[in-house]
Image (cartoon, grey):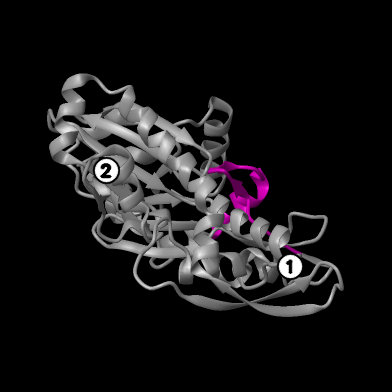
Amino acid sequence: MYERLRSWFSVDMGIDLGTCNTLVAVRGEGIVLNEPSVVAVKKGTNEVLNNGNAVGWMAKEMLGKTPGSITAVRPLKDGVISDFEITEAMLSYFIRKVNGKSFRFLGPRVVISIPSGITEVEKRAVLDSAERAGASRIYLLEEPVAAAIGAGLPFVEPTASMIVDIGGGTTEVAIMSLADIAVCESVRVAGDDLDEAIISHMKKTYNMMIGEQSAERIKIEIGSAAPVGEETTMEVRGRDMVSGLPRKMILSSEEVREALQEPVQAIVEAVTRTLERAEPELAADLVENGITLAGGGALLRGIDTVLSSATGLDVVIAEDPLTCVARGTAIFLENIEKLKDNLQSDMDV
């Protein structure tokens, strides 16, 4: 009865607090917000521009283009909080944006996904940020569990399910059975490292500086982990490191694939290490059940082929992999009484 009454006066939400993007899902409504994890502040302060509203898409457009008085900040690095105050401001903005659609008496109950390798200090930072952002009760849910729920894997059954969630800051690899994680590994190599590999390639090979957003576009448009179809090219613009002048050039998909080999191999090694630690019966199940990919990195062309070749298992990409974790947090909220034993921690405010 209390929970029913509570639902009239507050909105429950699940948050995928990602290094690159933050997604918010509301119980019964699905994904209601998907914005970049970027905040624009006055330089030398933590004061958010535009009356606290220069967050998300508005702030991302400023990345690499700000004047000296403004800084566009990504307050999460490698999946964890690197700037506490700015993360709090960002969370407050997103919670207000979702919760403010209708008048509410109570702060929301919030489920936040966290990397499985998070430390107690990093976990405390997430809890404190969400509390100060206005949440009335906070649950922390490991990302592999949220991704498995969102991908529709039968992880509560006595059979092995394997999820590889390639996010912006971390790659979460987990084998699950009976609604819990049997074996997992969290590596801080993911989408950002793919972008950095492209930036580094442009510097070393062409003495050309490009920004984060340009590197991301290259990765999306012509990036791949394995040969897929006809090779393509795209025009790249940046700054010549010798002359200091603007310049453009043509880059091939083959070059980009070569540049991405190191971070891709690090992800493959994390997957194989996790499989090597699995119990024989779990490994036997995976021969039939295979591996499911989630997260934005799952959209890198050919990543499924590379993983399948390295492991000998079937690899499938989850439906809408970008939103798997956020959808999983919302489904978790709907079944919280049955699944709450899987929480990393929870806190009443």
- Which residue occupies the extreme top position in the image? 279
Between residue 119 and residue 233, name the one nearer to us. Answer: 233
Quadrant in the picture for the N terminus = top left
Between residue 319 and residue 103, name the one nearer to us. Answer: 319
- Secondary structure under tag 1 reads strand
Task: Check disc 1 and report the residue beneath it.
Answer: 208
Q: Is residue 240 above or below residue 80?
A: below
Rendered residue at 57%/44% (across/down): 132
Density class for disc 1 (Cα within 10 Å; few <14, some 14-19, many ≥20) is: many
Rendered residue at 20%/20% (across/down): 280
**What are the residue bounds of the magenta stretch?**
71-93
Rendered residue at 15%/28% (across/down): 284
- Please say whether residue 142 is visible from this viewpoint: no
Answer with the quarter of the image where residue 173 lies: top left
Between residue 43 and residue 172, name the one nearer to us. Answer: 172
- Is 152 a magenta residue? no
Task: Check disc 2 and report the residue beneath it.
Answer: 148
- Distance in Å between CA atoms under marks 1 and 2: 40 Å
| Amino acid on which disc 2 is placed | Ala
The x, y position of residue 243, in whole percent, is 87, 73
